[in-house]
Image (spheres, helix red, strand yellow):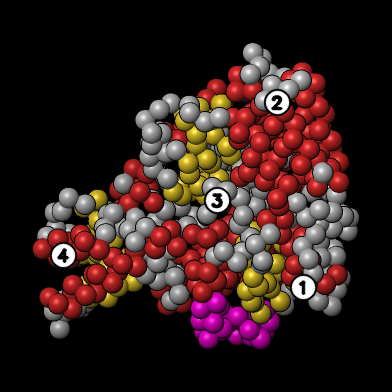
Amino acid sequence: MTDPLKIHISGDASACALGADATAHAVMVEAEQRGVEIEVVRSGSRGMFWLEPLLEVVTATGRVGYGPIGAADVAGLFDADFGNGGAHALRVGRVEEIPFFKNQDRLSFARVGITDPLSVADYLAHDGFRGLDRALSISPAAIVVAVTESGLRGRGGAAFPTGRKWKTVQDTVAEQKYIVCNADEGDSGTFSDRLLMEGDPLCLIEGITIAGIAVGATQGYIYLRSEYPHAQRALNAAIANAYAEGYLGADVCGSGQHFDLEVRLGAGAYICGEETSMLDSLEGKRGQVRAKPPLPAIRGLFGQPTVINNVISFASVPIIMAKGATFYHDYGVGRSRGTLPIQLAGNLQHTGLVEKSFGVTLRELLYDYGGGSLSGRPLRAVQVGGPLGAYLPEAQFDTPLDYEAFAAIGAMLGHGGIIAFDDTVDMLEQARYAMEFCAIESCGKCTPCRIGSVRGIEVIDRIHHGIESDKNFALLNDLCQTMRGGSLCALGGLTPDPVRSALQYFPEDFAMPTSPVTA
């Protein structure tokens, strides 16, 4: 008896939006009609959205990809003997050899698109839980030292040293400590958290559990944005499987260590991506920013010491523990160590996820990976770091992805999202959008953010209509300084960045011959 034909089709939300469910159904129907025994695995996405729905078939010589495969293409695949890697117009060959994929540094995303996301056995077969095994064999202090020496910094945007945060919680005496994963991925053009949670949720579970063991926390929460139903289902199923196999619960892997984990849904507020606002939401309150100090590491969830990191930060921990701090630290440049999952979106031929070591330039990402603009027109600007990130002109495209290099040009890496615009973009409209976004998403607690963003829209509208331009440019500049210096959190404090960068680099869109921005 021969083994069934094994076929991988992504169950990721992006792939499903592009027709992956219909493709998977068509494959099963066609196989039944032809009497072909198959096994369809709904894996994560490889992160190449222009090829979705991507179908990969396991052959005697390895996995062979075909894409994008719509339901109408399925019969032709069977006719082409795709089970043996047969020739077809949509055959892309071995996915690992596609230049977009081949030249990446896949650490956190090593299993995404390869394994069954919910299978503990498959996870173990691909080096899963090796990091947890090592963490359980050493002292909590040694775990924190390894994370510190790896150079891992928060991947949610603030880039705070992860080991330092864990050490603070570890050293704070309390009867109860918590681990909170911030999975409220709300920045426009970002999707790495979702791809990881849907494609390799056990990696996230492993990383969070290691954090709990390191600092002495017995309860963890994944704060997930409500707009991610696919991720919610994947996480809950994976958590249940981890409990069933002894990787969560009262006796983790027979070690005597206790750690519980559950998913909590947000309610769609962007501000809850800010850590203290998220804590209020977890406690059942309206999400509003808390004044700091005290830091959440000392007084966080329910007033107890709390480790808060984002999805990619936690997902980086298993490989640090499994392969050592030096292995991870050897990737990257300067103080930016390891890899960053970069999300390419906007006007590009090839959009998707690229995991690369720090040091790759914007130009490499936009052209070597993104393939240049989809429209065929010149790329004029990119926004890096979500809706609060600066707009960068072509002259800045050779900037390496490095926290300090970006800070030096008044920009930030944020969550690693990159949105590209061609030369038809109206930068005045983009600046106005930043103020409008802040006005909509402000929690309302502080005046500079709550009122300043509304006034910012009004001032930009007056500039747009040519009303007392000189006075309104001066007013806008003053308003941006007030928001930056007076806002309680980064929402109001960073909103000036896209506005001022648009004014600085694209003054012609504001009917100004030179930049009106002052220091």
Residue 150 appears in the rendering: no
In the depicted structure, whether residue 411 falls above or below residue 245:
above
The label on residue 190 is 3
**First reached walking from the N terminus: tag 1 or tag 2:** 1
Q: Tell me the kind of residue under disc 4.
A: Ala
Q: Which residues are magenta?
A: 236-259
**Measured from the top left, where is residue 125 in percent x and y?**
41, 72
**Mark 2 — residue?**
463
Q: Does label 4 or label 2 sit earlier along the sequence?
A: 4
Q: Secondary structure at mark 3?
A: loop
- Give the amino acid type for the residue marked by disc 1 in the picture: Gly
Given this view, does label 1 or label 3 mark the residue nearer the observer? 1
Closer to the camera in the image, 277 or 94: 277
Judge depth for marks 3 and 4 and give the one in front.
4
Q: Which residue is mark 1?
A: 284
Q: CA distance from mark 1 to mark 3?
A: 27 Å
**Residue at the image point whose x is 53% and y is 69% from the top:** 229
Circle 4 residue: 75
Picture residue at 55% right of the left edge, 71% below the top:
232
Mark 4 to mark 2: distance in Å?
Answer: 58 Å
**Do labels 2 and 3 touch, CB within 8 Å?**
no
Nearer mark to the viewer, of 2 and 3: 2
Q: Hey, what amino acid is under mark 3? A: Thr
Q: Secondary structure at mark 4?
A: helix
